[in-house]
Structures are given as structure tokens and as C-alpha cells.
Image (tube, rainbow, N blue to C red):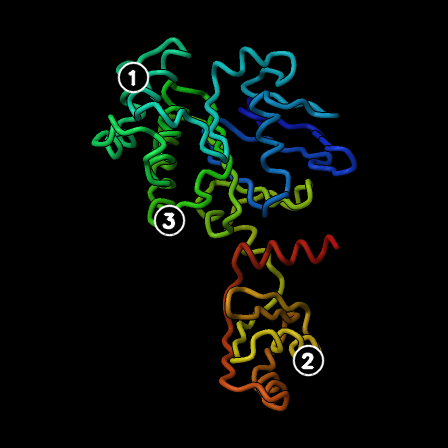
């Protein structure tokens, strides 16, 4: 990759006996929207803190815009924007006061870089005199993003920015990120929501501090090797157990109120499976063939790793 914006080479980090990151390596080109997808405890926040120069790695190296995260941390902090998972702005300051404060820290003003944040700031400007602590979750999120962008960073780190935010605000936020890409800002975002993976240019699937796969979302889904049936019944917990008793099943995973059942390629035994479940006294059995999602791919990779 020519002149990557972010380079991570065999980064590891432990907290006592717990390995938060284990030999993580990847590169992100300039202007890419790169996603880290994984559950809580997967190592996403530790990685982001290392890249934001807030935490030292145990081993390995990383660079941001060609600068070493350990040796050049002061220079890096001037050119990156960082939005931590927990809202960290000043609750007692107003929207406008928070934004002015962050602009001053970086030696700039709201007016100087207003074009970069105007699409976002216009949505919260009617509440500019309201204290940050009194804003809704979605409004806090937009204010935090404005503060991270006010100095026109080259790289933007967003650690689980949509966690705990309603579905509409989540989609609005990703629309904002897509527009920011036009400014050639490199964006790295983490999320536990698998459905957000498709909104990234490329994603890294991470679990237990290890990267399981890096690729474009559509390529990850296209590489799924098994056929899937979504199975429902009125006795869901018993359903999971009874499905495991059916011959030829590759895996069974719970997805909401349905069980996703995978088979090796071949003719799907829909009717045979239905008879098996009816014989196990399941009622209202519903079976349909579905296409794989990123979450199906994630679960398959986890099963393979284990």
C-alpha cells in the first residue's frame, strides 16, 4: 500500500493476564472509511487509545501519517481528531462554549473551519446555548463529532460513536461520515453493530484481541461458504437444542427470534428438518432460506478460530 495513513505492525497489549491485543497488524490508506467490528471486550478501545497516543503498546509499532505513536505523540495529537466511546465534553458548558474551547486548544476558531462542520453543526445550532449535559444522546454525538473536527484533522478516530443512540441518529451519523470522506479525511471507526459494517469501505473483524479477517464488506459476505436457513418456532430455547440433533448441520446460532442454521453446499433438507422439529413437538415452525450477513460471517470465523 503506497503512503498509508495508518500503519499498525504486530501491536500487542495486555492488562495483567488479559491479552487485549495480540499481534495486530493492518494498514489504512488515505481517505478510507475503515471499520473495526467486534463485540465489547474485543480490543477495539485499546487499539484506538494506542493510535490516539493515550496508551503505550507492550510490543509492536504504529504510525499515523508517517509519525510514530510513541516517539512523535505530540505531533500526532495536533493532526488527529478523537471521539472516545464515552461522552467526554464539559457537561456544564453550552454547545457553543464546548466547541469554542476545543477550537482554542488547537489554535483555531469556529469560523475558520466552519465549512467542515457546518452540515453537522446546523443540526445542533438551535440548541447552541443549551448545556451539553442536557442534550439528547444523538445531539451529544453530533457535538462531540464537531469538537473532534474543529481543527480540521488529517485522521479521525471514532470509538463506538453510535452505541446507545437511536436508529435514526445512527443512520444520520453514518451519512455525515460519508460526506466527511469527500474532504479526504482518513476515518477509523469501531462499532459492535454488525449492520454498520456494510457502511465502511473496508472492515476488520476482531475478537479476543485478534483480527480474524480484513476485507471489503461485500467480499466477506461473498466468501461465506455455507447455505443458511432461518428457523423459528414457538419454543425457541428448545429449538436450539433440537436443531443440534439434526444430522448434517454445520452450525446453529441465535439471531434475535430466529436460529440461523448452516449446511454444507448441497440440497437444503427443508422438509426433512421440518419433520424433525414437528416430531420434537415444535409448533408454528417457519423455515426459509436466507442470504448470509456480516454477522453470520463473524460467527463462522469465531467457530473456526475455536
Give the image quarter of residue 36: top right
Say which mark, if any, is on residue 69. none
The local secondary structure at tag 1 comes to loop
Residue 228, position in %: x, y?
A: 57, 69
Give the image quarter of residue 13: top right
> What residue is rendered at 53% in x and 47% in y?
192
For marks 2 and 1, give the CA distance: 63 Å
The local secondary structure at tag 2 comes to loop
Q: Against 3, is 241 above or below? A: below
Residue lying farthest to the front in this orientation: 92
Residue 169, position in %: x, y?
A: 34, 44
**In the rendered image, which quarter contains the C terminus?**
bottom right
Q: Would residue 60 be found to the left or right of residue 197 on screen?
A: right
Residue 32, position in %: x, y?
A: 47, 33
Residue lying farthest to the right in this orientation: 17
Residue 166, position in %: x, y?
A: 37, 49
For marks 3 and 1, give the CA distance: 28 Å
Observer-nearest of 224 and 198: 198
Residue position marked by numbered label 3 in the rendering: 166
Q: Against 78, is 187 above or below? A: below
Observer-nearest of 273 and 17: 17
> What residue is rendered at 33% in x and 49% in y?
168
Residue position marked by numbered label 1 in the rendering: 110
Give the image quarter of residue 63: top right
**Tag 3 near tag 1, CB within 8 Å:** no
**Tag 2 near tag 1, CB within 8 Å:** no
> Is residue 2 in sight in this rendering?
no
> Is residue 219 in sight in this rendering?
yes
Residue lying farthest to the left in this orientation: 126
Say which mark, if any, is on residue 246. 2
Q: Earlier in the sequence, mark 2 or mark 3?
A: 3
Amino acid at each position: 500500500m503506497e503512503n498509508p495513513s495508518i500503519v499498525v505492525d504486530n501491536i500487542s497489549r495486555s492488562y495483567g493476564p488479559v491479552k487485549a491485543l495480540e499481534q495486530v497488524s493492518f494498514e489504512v490508506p488515505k481517505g478510507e472509511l475503515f471499520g473495526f467490528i467486534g463485540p465489547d471486550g474485543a480490543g477495539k478501545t485499546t487499539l484506538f487509545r494506542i493510535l490516539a497516543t493515550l496508551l503505550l503498546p507492550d510490543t509492536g509499532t504504529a504510525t499515523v501519517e508517517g509519525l510514530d505513536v510513541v516517539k512523535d505523540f505530540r505531533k500526532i495529537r495536533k493532526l488527529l481528531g478523537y471521539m472516545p466511546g464515552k461522552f467526554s465534553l464539559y457537561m456544564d458548558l453550552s454547545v457553543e462554549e464546548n466547541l469554542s474551547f476545543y477550537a482554542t486548544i488547537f489554535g483555531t476558531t469556529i469560523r475558520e473551519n466552519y465549512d467542515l462542520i457546518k452540515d453537522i453543526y446546523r443540526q445542533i445550532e438551535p440548541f447552541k446555548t443549551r448545556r451539553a449535559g442536557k442534550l439528547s444522546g444523538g445531539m451529544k454525538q453530533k457535538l462531540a463529532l464537531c469538537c473532534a473536527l474543529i481543527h480540521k484533522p488529517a485522521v479521525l478516530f471514532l470509538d463506538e460513536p453510535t452505541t446507545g443512540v437511536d436508529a435514526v441518529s445512527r443512520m444520520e451519523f453514518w451519512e455525515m461520515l460519508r460526506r466527511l470522506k469527500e474532504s479526504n479525511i482518513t476515518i477509523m471507526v469501531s462499532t459492535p453493530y454488525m449492520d454498520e459494517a456494510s457502511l465502511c469501505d473496508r472492515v476488520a473483524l476482531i475478537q479476543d484481541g485478534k483480527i480474524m479477517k480484513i476485507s471489503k464488506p461485500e467480499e466477506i459476505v461473498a466468501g461465506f461458504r455455507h447455505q443458511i436457513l432461518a428457523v423459528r418456532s414457538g419454543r425457541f430455547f428448545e429449538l436450539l437444542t433440537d436443531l443440534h440433533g439434526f444430522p448434517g448441520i454445520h452450525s446453529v446460532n441465535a439471531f434475535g427470534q430466529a436460529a440461523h442454521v448452516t449446511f454444507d453446499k448441497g440440497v437444503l433438507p427443508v422438509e426433512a428438518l421440518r419433520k424433525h422439529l414437528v416430531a420434537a413437538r415444535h409448533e408454528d415452525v417457519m423455515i426459509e432460506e436466507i442470504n448470509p450477513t456480516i454477522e453470520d460471517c463473524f460467527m463462522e470465523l469465531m467457530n473456526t478460530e475455536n
